Amino acid sequence: MNKIIRHTRSVCPVCLRNLPAELVREDTGRIVMEKSCPAHGAFRVPVWQGRVDWDAWLLGREPLGEGSALRCPENCGICTEHEIGTCCALLEVTERCNLRCRFCFARGGEGCAEPPLDELKEAVRDIVRRCGSPLLQLSGGEPTLRGDLPELVRFAKEAGCSYVQLNTNGIRLAREPDYAKRLADAGLDIVFLQFDGTKDEIYETLRGEPLLAVKKEAIRVCGDLRLGVTLVPTVVRGVNDGDLGGIISLACRLAPAVRGIHFQPVSWFGRYPKTPEEADRYTLDQLMADISEQAGIPIESFMPSRCDHPLCGFHASFLLEPSGGLRPLSSITHSAHSRGCARDNREYVARHWRRAPEEPAPSAALSEEMDFDTFLYRLRHESLTLSAMAFQDAMNLNLERLHSCSLHVYDKGRVKPFCAKYLTPILPE
């Protein structure tokens, strides 16, 4: 018998009106969101497939309080109902793009607006004033189309941003190593590289071009410059959900240039090819189960976020073994009382995604022993982090999750949760 297990609020996927919603556990163990709009009818969407224990994963989080989130996300900005500070602040530096991807939250390439550098510098100053010393993600469009991007990176570090991360498809980095060096010399910390799989047909389907060789060259260039690279696959059912193990295997071979993989199950906002059906939905627990099966990783290795809402993502850390395998360093045995803050999350990201400075290996690293110094060395130089962010769209938006978002977008003088900024209607076909 189906059972309502949680009350929350969401939006109508057609008109974006704020609505009450229920999370319902079906007999199969699957959990769906149900909601109804007076103008557009009833909607239901799967949010959990039952591959991981839902109750344990929630870390004892309390549901939305009565009377909460009644005006979200209309005119959204960080308000008194928001529960967490800014870990990562995203700044769009251009609408231009050198690709036309089927899935794009920012609709890259649909416009040509490019704010002048002075305007972007003032935005960085405002971000620091509002958010403290965040990790700043420069995004677009394709941010590397700006020739002055290195100057903006240098300015951001001088203005007080703890770390600067570049969200890129990697094309210019691969083709113009001197440009990549200018970014590295300016203080760039992390390259967040669009990387959807190990086969060109995946890129042809999702990005319109065979890009695997370009992606590998971008990684090589960044590796030579000691820029930490995090691979970012957009995971789409029937396209690359069977290549997760392949991506992990390749990342292990490309370490230490590659420091992590940040999986993003596809969401329907911005630009997408068609109205999603129920079978298109790819939930966070399904992603964990598929990674576990394809890469031979114990599912207990994955831990929910202690900064954002547990349903927003996972992380897992591993030591790289000489045989090519992964030794888990994390466990699902966590506590609901160990929730971190945005600053802690930011430092976790920096430790795992940046390249550590060069240093001599301890003598024990050349033997079978593993003393504490050797462990720390291997953690800095011979480790890999797997993580994920399950973005929300108008069908599955859960305002309980939105209240715990630490990924914020700077938008015309306001700071907004990512899924509120990019929320778009899903119009019926």
Image (cartoon, rainbow, N blue to C red):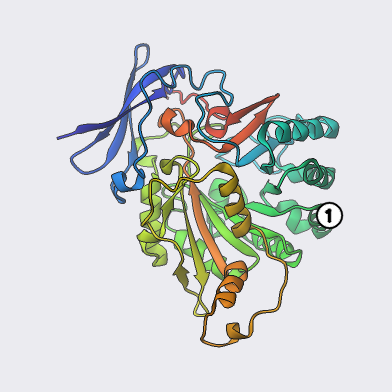
What residue sits 60% from the left and 35% below the top?
408
Say which of 66 and 106 sits in front: 66
In the rendered image, residue 115, in percent from the top left (x then y), is placed at 79, 30
Residue 282: quadrant of the picture? top left
Q: Is residue 258 visible?
A: yes
Say which of 49 and 351 sits in front: 351
On screen, residue 126 above or below 54? above
In the rendered image, residue 273, in percent from the top left (x then y), is placed at 51, 35
Answer with left or right where residue 19 lies relative to residue 199: left
On screen, residue 37 above or below 199? above
Q: What element carries label 1?
A: helix
Answer with left or right where residue 6 lies relative to residue 415: left
What residue sits 42% from the left and 43% below the top?
310
Residue under numbered circle 1: 182
In the rendered image, residue 36, in percent from the top left (x then y), is placed at 32, 19
Say which of 347 and 201 sits in front: 347
Going by the numbered disc 1, the residue's amino acid type is Arg
Q: Quadrant of the N terminus?
A: top left
Q: How many marks?
A: 1
Residue 23: quadrant of the picture? top left
Q: In which quarter of the image is the C terminus?
A: top left
Q: Can residue 243 be seen in this view?
A: no
What residue sits 52% from the left and 36% below the top?
405
In the rendered image, residue 88, in percent from the top left (x then y), is placed at 62, 42
What residue sits 60% from the left and 48% below the top?
346
